[in-house]
Image (cartoon, rainbow, N blue to C red):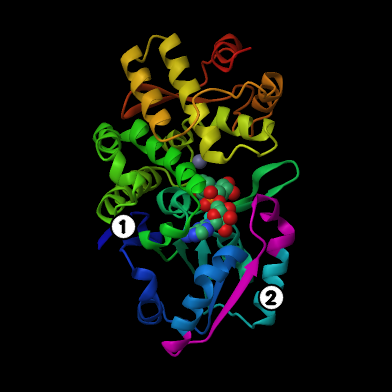
Amino acid sequence: MSKLEVGLGERSYPITIEQGCLNRIGTDLSSAYPASRYCIIADDNVAELYGMRLQQEIEMAGMSCDLLDFPHGEAHKNLATVASLLSRAAQKRLDRKSLIIALGGGISGDIAGFVAATYMRGIPFVQIPTSLLAQVDSSVGGKTGVDIPEGKNLVGSFYQPEAVYIDSDVLNTLPGKEYINGMAEVIKHGIIRDADYFQMLDQKFDQVMALDPGVLAELIYGSCKIKSAVVAEDEKESNTRRILNFGHTIGHAVEAASDFQILHGFAVAIGMVACARISVLKGILGNDKLAAIISMIKRYGLPTEVPEDLDRNRIKSYLLTDKKRINTKTSYILAVDIGEVIITDEVSDEEIDAVIGI
Ligand SMILES: NC(=O)c1ccc[n+]([C@@H]2O[C@H](COP(=O)([O-])OP(=O)(O)OC[C@H]3O[C@@H](n4cnc5c(N)ncnc54)[C@H](O)[C@@H]3O)[C@@H](O)[C@H]2O)c1
Ligand SMILES: [Zn+2]
């Protein structure tokens, strides 16, 4: 077992990484986070795989526990799902002393966290992430929220959980493509902050792909450590936290231009390579480092180029409306080394065109 602390003063919380911890969480929660009722929120897939079991465990520990599910998929990460969950929470008589358990991938975490942030003006919640992306990224940092037709994640709140519990055993049921999707964020963590971690992903490739429990523990710990350190430095993303968006400005545009047919991590991989190429064009990153980034991304089965059949002009128009735009300029995160990035708004249209292939 390993533990980390997300250092946010009064809102600090522990991350517990322990193989098999899902089987013991019922007792742990009832002693560490006593509540009038527990309420698990999960999408239908995860509710069936793990939600019912967790509900039983909590009930066996002598506590009342509800399980609220919603249909899986980004199309359901919206206000209608939140409204329905809030009504069901009220019907179950959840009160200010109840605890919400966000069980599932990033979508469940974002939705359940937002429900917890808004129900009765905020009740406590814990995160039990079950996808690799959620275990290494979205469950840490307190961003919660949903999509509206005008854009992804446009509505939400910074709302930190009481605790995060990560059990790598659940990854055994995660579809392979979703696993690779999460690997993009793992590689990102190495590029933005930690060259040794990046190297480890290369050296232990076979074990990572075989879901070796020891290596998974090391990988999850490494990513959570990097993410929590960045979040602790800048909780509300006024500055440093923006480095977590490495590859995301172009990635989001690729995702949107593909009508979300390209998964987030796959789009971010394309975005990371594009930004590394811009860094080389600007003379701030060596060609050897760009080659190392490309080879790592390829090795994990992620794409490095915008697919042939994707309309480049659509990507550009999404870039123009990116919500991260400050005044009139879009900011980009560029790599200066493996393990070090900078934030800049000095990226020209010509540089973008050159790397996305217009
Ligand atoms: N809050 C943040 O900081 C943050 C960061 C990154 C991404 N996100 C958000 O996260 C979402 C993407 O998260 P995701 O990729 O985890 O998607 P997801 O929640 O849809 O999970 C992917 C799929 O895997 C299934 N699944 C999850 N765990 C499983 C398991 N152990 N076994 C079998 N199936 C399992 C889910 O039912 C779903 O179908 C996006 O909406 C994105 O905006 C949020
Ligand atoms: Zn991401």
Judging from the image, what secondary structure is the residue with disc 1 in? strand
Q: Residue at x 65, y 82 (%)?
A: 92
In this view, the residue in front, 158 or 9, is: 158
Pinpoint residue 319: horizontal percent, then vertical percent.
64, 25
- Residue 154, compared with residue 170, is above or below; it is above
Q: Quadrant of residue 293?
A: top left
Asked whether residue 319 appears in the rendered view, the answer is yes
Q: Are marks 1 and 2 in contact (CB under 8 Å)?
A: no
- Residue 68 covered by magenta stretch: yes
Q: Quadrant of residue 31?
A: bottom left
- Residue 182, compared with residue 130, is above or below; it is above
* Quadrant where the C terminus is found in the figure: top right
- Residue 55 covered by magenta stretch: no
Pinpoint residue 144: horizontal percent, then vertical percent.
56, 54
- Residue 119, compared with residue 141, is above or below; it is below
For the record, the magenta segment spans 59-82
Asked whether residue 159 appears in the rendered view, the answer is no
> Residue reaching furthest bottom?
62
Q: Please state which of the two labelled residues, at mark 1 or mark 2, is closer to the viewer.
A: 2
Q: Residue at x 59, y 9 (%)?
A: 350
Which mark, residue 5? 1
Which mark, residue 88? 2
Q: Tell me the amino acid under the disc marked 1.
A: Glu
Q: Total number of numbered labels?
A: 2
Q: Is mark 2 within 8 Å of ligand 1?
A: no
* Quadrant where the N terminus is found in the figure: bottom left
